[in-house]
Amino acid sequence: MWKSFNAGRALVVAAAVVAGAVAVPGTSLAAAASATGTVKTAGAALTVRSGPGTGYTGWRTIANGASVTLLCQTSGESVTGTYGTTKLWDLLSNGGMVSDAYIYTGSDGQVVNSCAYVGAEPSSKTNPRAAEGAINWEFQHYGSSAYENLCLAFAAQAYGWGGSGWNTAEIGGDWESSHGYLNTTGIPPRGALVWYHNSTGDGHVAISLGEGKVIGTSVAGHVGVAGYLDHGMYRGWSVAYLPAAW
C-alpha cells in the first residue's frame, strides 16, 4: 500500500522538504529537520527498538493511530508492514527507532534527514562492539539504577570493554580534549561519546543517539534518554575512542 496523499489525508511536516530533492538513507542530502507521522498497524501496538532492526532491544510500544515525531531516518533491516516492504527506519523524538513500514508520512520515501553517525575510532584501539551494539546494550539496562556514579564504566562496557581504564569521566574528557578528539560544535552524531563537567569534579559521559538525544546514567537516578544539553556543563563529543580500556 502506498503512503501517497489522497483526499481527506494530511501530513504535518515540521520543516519544508527541499523542492525536487530525492533523499537516500546514508547520504547527506537534506530532506527536513523533522516530520510528524502516524502509527498504522493492523491494530497491535508498534514496538520501539534501540536500533534499525527487529533484533534490537524493544523498550516501549506505541499504540496504533498515535502521532509520532521523526527526527531522522536510516537504512536497516528490511521489514514488510502496512505500507509494503522497506529498509527505512525512523528515529523518533524519544530516541527509539521504528520501521517506516508502519508509519504513515504521506510518502513512500525518505521525508527527514539521514541520521548522522560518528566516525570510527582509531584502528589501534578498536572497540569490541560497534555503535549500534553499544546503544542496544545500554537500552537493555534502561531504567536500571545499578550504574549510578559509574557512567564511564557503563559507556565502556556498552562498547564491549571490561572498563575504561580512567578513574573518572573528567579524566576521560580531559584526555579526549588534550589529544584533539573533543568536538565542541555540532550536535553529537549517533554513537559518539558525549562529555560533561559536573559539580563533583568527576565529570559525566553518555552515548549519543543522534539528533540531540543521549542515553546513559543519571537520568532521574537511572539509565534513561535525555537531551544532550539536559545534564548541564556540556563539554563536547568525541568518537568512541577509549585508549586505556581493558
Image (cartoon, helix red, strand yellow):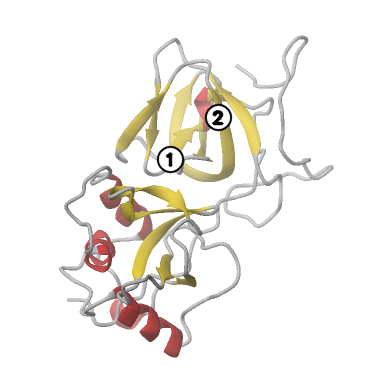
Question: Element at badge 2?
Answer: strand
The residue depicted at 60 percent of the width and 67 percent of the height is: 186
User: Badges 1 and 2: C-beta atoms under 8 Å apart?
Assistant: no
Type of the residue with mark 2 = Val
Name the residue tied to disc 1.
Answer: 96
Spot occupied by residue 131 in the image (x, y as percentages of width and height): 37, 59
Q: How many marks?
A: 2
The disc label shown at residue 47, or none: none
Residue appearing at x 17%, y 76% in the figure? 246
Quadrant of res 3: top right
What label sits on residue 68 in the rendered view? Answer: 2
Please indicate whether residue 207 sits to the left or right of residue 27 in the image: left
Left or right of residue 47, residue 161 in this image: left
**Residue occupying image coordinates x 43% and y 72%:** 239
| Residue 179 appearing in the image | no
Q: Residue at x 52, y 20 (%)?
A: 66
- Front residue of 246/169: it is 169
Q: Mark 1 vs mark 2: which is more N-terminal?
A: 2
Which amino acid type corresponds to the residue marked 1 in the rendered image?
Gly
Q: Position of residue 242 (x, y in %)?
A: 30, 76
Marks 1 and 2 sit apart, C-alpha to C-alpha, by 11 Å
Q: Is residue 71 visible?
A: yes
